[in-house]
Image (tube, helix red, strand yellow):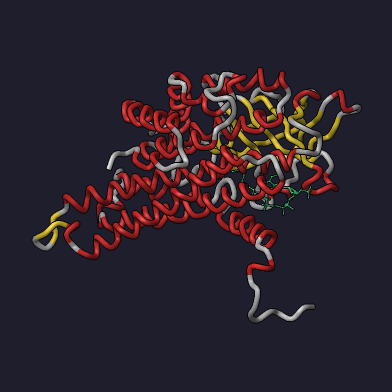
């Protein structure tokens, strides 16, 4: 089985197949020292930018590779990068997530100022939504952007953001803040905040089990010009959700890449490991486990590719299409990350003691996968999104007879 066989599925076209093949040749040649997560991330952004891969994070009008963001290209890129290096995938993904709101809603001047630099790897991007008490409940954020005097004069940001990927190394942050605190999710706006803005402090690094650049941002009387507003005033929550919608399917792809790698590691180990006078792979117990792992990987792949295909080929123009895509992306993210965790755990178990030895691939994958079940919408949030969609869309006529709950 060739490493790009899955791209033969009808969700992809010839351009995606070429992209996957070219990337598979490129990634293993990169020699990036990943001991220091911040330095490694900067180095990956530089390498990905120089090689042109970051051009898939922005549209062609601003230096991108394709006319519009292509979900299937993002999926191919993230799956392949994550297979080889979860940190390379992280560096790539953050350029997309941190510029996605500018692509979707930026003014022509904002798009020209940021997107080409993101595509070249000259500016490192970040997305600042979460707060200490507003993670899954993103609308509960407390950071405030007060308008100074008249709307044209600008804004002052006060508050704190946390769990911000690329925090401390980013050149700019897309920050979400309350502009009408009494209006709930309808009172949130987005802003582009350059890292050099006085009052912004991104020095509080957060150490996590799979190191990557992560920080808490303090915003104290950050003065922003009026043209830092990104998209519509009070339109920030929907913009954040639309941005996350695009990238959730790509998180699924990253999980898929890690799961595929774990399966490959398990197969290689089982074929080589002598046990009870045979090889580990000769035991039915091992074969059953590998079979289960392969099915979990393929189930995740089909849901991930379907979500990306829906966005690219069916579109999100109508409300019904947008809702269908949101639910499909949530289903892909939930299934791929949960399945990957199981597959990696099974691969580690198959390695026995070697599986927990620091420095083996399955050991690092075990740590790498964990946060994907949490960030960009935890599994429980995806369940909520899918459940609401099912309740809304499954027609009553789907059940024509049988027991009913009494009407109240
Ligand atoms: N696209 C566009 N609009 C969306 C949307 C989407 N995917 N999802 C929700 N909206 C809109 C709703 O239509 C609603 O609009 P109206 O005010 O016009 O009615 C508004 O946003 C609020 O929606 P809802 O009432 O569903 O919001 P909730 O506060 O209940 O939150 C969840 C919904 C939980 C789904 C949301 O808060 C979420 O995704 N949380 C996870 C956040 C996250 O991923 N954090 C990680 C940050 S990046 S590491």
Where residue 241 sits: x, y (%)? 67, 43
Tally of marks: 0
Identify the residue at the far left of this view.
277
Q: Quadrant of residue 24?
A: top left
The extreme right residue here reads 150
Residue 148 horizontal/vertical position (percent): 87, 29
Q: Residue at x 54, y 25 (%)?
A: 66
Residue 25 x %, y %: 33, 28
Is residue 68 depicted above or below 162 in this figure?
above
Quarter of the figure with the C terminus:
bottom right
Residue 172 screen position, x and y as percent = 63, 26
Which quadrant does the N terminus fall into? top left
Residue 126, compared with residue 272, is above or below; it is above
- Between residue 265 and residue 80, name the one nearer to us: 80
Answer with the quarter of the image where residue 345 lies: bottom left
Residue drawn at (77%, 26%), measured in percent from left and top? 223
Residue drawn at x 48%, y 31% is: 38
Q: Quadrant of residue 113?
A: top right
Does 93 appear above or below 382? above
Q: Nearer the viewer, residue 5 or 230?
A: 5
Residue at left offset 48%, top offset 36%: 90
Residue 299 lies left or right of residue 189; in this view the side is left
């Amino acid at each position: 089985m060739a490493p790009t066989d899955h791209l033969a599925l009808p969700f992809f076209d010839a351009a995606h197949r070429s992209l996957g093949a070219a990337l598979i040749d490129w990634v293993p040649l990169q020699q990036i020292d990943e001991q220091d997560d911040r330095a490694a991330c900067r180095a990956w952004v530089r390498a990905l930018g120089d090689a042109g891969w970051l051009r898939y994070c922005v549209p062609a009008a601003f230096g991108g590779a394709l006319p519009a963001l292509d979900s299937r290209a993002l999926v191919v890129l993230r799956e392949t990068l994550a297979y080889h290096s979860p940190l390379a995938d992280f560096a790539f993904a953050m350029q997309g997530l941190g510029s996605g709101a500018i692509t979707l809603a930026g003014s022509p001047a904002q798009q020209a100022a940021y997107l080409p630099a993101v595509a070249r790897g000259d500016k490192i991007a970040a997305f600042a939504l979460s707060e200490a008490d507003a993670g899954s409940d993103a609308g509960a954020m407390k950071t405030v952007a007060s308008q100074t005097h008249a709307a044209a004069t600008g804004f002052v940001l006060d508050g704190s953001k946390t769990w911000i990927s690329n925090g401390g190394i980013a050149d700019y942050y897309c920050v979400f803040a309350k502009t009408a605190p009494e209006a709930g999710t309808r009172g949130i706006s987005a802003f582009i905040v350059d890292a050099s803005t006085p009052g912004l402090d991104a020095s509080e690094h957060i150490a996590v089990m799979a190191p990557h650049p992560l920080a808490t941002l303090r915003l104290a009387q950050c003065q922003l010009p009026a043209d830092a507003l990104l998209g519509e005033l009070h339109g920030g929550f929907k913009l954040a959700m639309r941005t996350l919608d695009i990238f959730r399917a790509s998180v699924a792809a990253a999980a898929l890449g890690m799961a595929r790698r774990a399966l490959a590691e398990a197969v290689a180990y089982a074929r080589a490991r002598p046990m009870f006078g045979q090889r580990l792979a000769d035991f039915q117990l091992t074969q059953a486990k590998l079979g289960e792992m392969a099915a979990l990987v393929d189930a995740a792949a089909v849901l991930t590719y379907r979500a990306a295909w829906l966005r690219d080929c069916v579109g999100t123009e109508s409300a019904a299409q947008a809702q269908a895509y949101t639910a499909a992306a949530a289903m892909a993210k939930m299934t791929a990350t949960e399945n990957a965790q199981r597959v990696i755990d099974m691969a580690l178990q198959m390695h026995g003691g070697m599986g927990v030895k620091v420095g083996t691939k399955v050991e690092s994958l075990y740590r790498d996968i964990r946060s994907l079940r949490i960030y960009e919408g935890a599994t429980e949030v995806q369940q909520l999104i899918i459940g609401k969609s099912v309740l809304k869309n499954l027609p009553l006529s789907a059940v024509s007879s049988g027991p009913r709950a009494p009407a109240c």
